[in-house]
Image (cartoon, grey):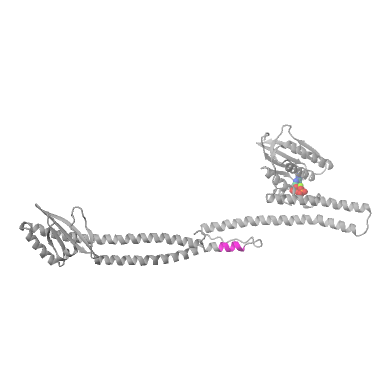
Amino acid sequence: MRSLPIQTRLTAWYSLILAVVLSLFGLSAYFEMRNSIHETVDEALRDRLRGVRGLILRNTQYGDDDVKRELRQHSELAGGALLQVADQQGNWLYRTASMSDLQIPLVNANFSGPFTFFSQKVPFRVTTAEIKVESQSYLVQIAAPLDDFYEALHRFGVVLLVSIPILLLFAAGGGYWLSRRALAPFDQITRTARSIGIQNLSNRLVVPQTRDVLQRLSETFNGMLERLEAAFKKISQFTADASHELRTPVAVMRTRAELSLRKTRTVAEYREALTQIHAELEKTSDLVEKLMLLARADYGAEVLQLSSANLGDIVRDACGQGRTLSENKQISFNEQIPDSPVWIKADAHALRRLLLILIDNAVKYTPPGGRVEVLVATDDGSALAAVRDTGIGIASEDLPNVFERFYRADKARSRDSGGVGLGLSIGRWIAEAHAGTIEVQSSLGHGSVFEVRLPLANGDN
Ligand SMILES: Nc1ncnc2c1ncn2[C@@H]1O[C@H](COP(=O)(O)OP(=O)(O)OP(=O)(O)O)[C@@H](O)[C@H]1O
Ligand SMILES: [Mg+2]
């Protein structure tokens, strides 16, 4: 059943329920009709019994013979009446000829209500009454044929038996047609869904304003397409930007090599060319490494190993390198790390990288003579690491974008200093992988502060 199409299943259930309902209706109608036939006939028989009773009461004082005579006259008048009367001892006082043919057993009137009796397959309705006159008592039984009524009942039964299956057939056909009609919009959705691919990801379903499951389904489907389209655009942009960034160093290296190979050069010239190519290669491999990290992070392959660590140690470690960077550029470098440990759950290698990204930026975007400060603290139940500089700052319109991939606030300046705009997006991923956040505050021309907030942990596990 489960493997059948839903239209067929719906129709089958619907037909089954209808079959049960119609059968119950047919049966109750049939028996109700039979009951009302019996009631009508019983009522007529009771009327006739009343007549016989009056007749007996009027004549008992003259003796049984008079009663018999009166009964005969009465029956002859009624023409073929079905009547029999017995005395107290069960002896027949009077029986019409047609009644004695039927051989209806004499029953006790006190225990038996009207009943149906078949004589030679012909149904009769029989009513019995006891009539008491002073010391005498008579049992009067009177019957009426039911064959005409039963014939009508039989015809009614046949009509039911024939019409119910025909009705069911029509209803099942109608049900199937209806369920196909109701499900047709789902086919439409399926067709549209099938037609959507990478080339037309911006296509959407037409949303019917029916406020029902169809509308919800179409809206959900469109919502999913929207998210897919956004994700796909992001990936395409990433790929385009990545190829673009790779093209420049590759072109530089190629030109450099081709120029050197044009004629024989001195050792010093070869050395210089190779040094330049090596420098480009270093930048390129750095770029490729960053791209791979982001790609692996995107599909969940890059997993950090978190263990208890002292944030102070990690930051101190990063500051060692940061100090060298800033000294090379005549920038004063300051670190404020508390002596007491600040325990967090961290992947020390990744977190050091995050700190280096921030320190590298601070040094890179601060002119000589400026100042870079690194500090560690606890604040409101979380661990805090901040990198502050007195550099060029970031314009407020650029602030929301600095964590985006390949975003550079000042494209020309960044390219000169070698930045591709991936540092902060990697940094944000590292912070989030530690269940932390990273935020920036900056004022153009005055400097910036990058703040990393991480959950505190117990030092003993
Ligand atoms: N401390 C800072 N002061 C001023 N601008 C900054 C600072 N840090 C980041 N920025 C701006 O944010 C942009 C993005 O920084 P991000 O570290 O992601 O890229 P990048 O430094 O340009 O390149 P990469 O770090 O990949 O070599 C930078 O290009 C720069 O414009
Ligand atoms: Mg950077």
Say whether residue 1 is magenta: no
Q: Is residue 215 left or right of residue 413?
A: left
Q: Quadrant of residue 77?
A: bottom left
The answer to whether one can see residue 15 in this image is yes
The answer to whether one can see residue 391 in this image is no
Q: In this rendered view, identify the residue nearer to me: 123 or 269.
A: 123
**Main secondary structure type of the part rendered in magenta:** helix
Q: Position of residue 378 (x, y in %)?
A: 69, 35
Q: In this rendered view, identify the residue nearer to me: 277 or 393.
A: 277
Q: In this rendered view, identify the residue nearer to me: 345 or 221.
A: 345
Q: Quadrant of residue 206?
A: bottom right
Q: Position of residue 31 (x, y in %)?
A: 30, 60
**Residue bounds of the magenta highlight:** 188-195
Q: Position of residue 34 (x, y in %)?
A: 28, 61
Q: Is residue 71 left or right of residue 104?
A: left
Q: Residue reaching furthest top?
A: 340
Q: Position of residue 97 (x, y in %)?
A: 15, 65
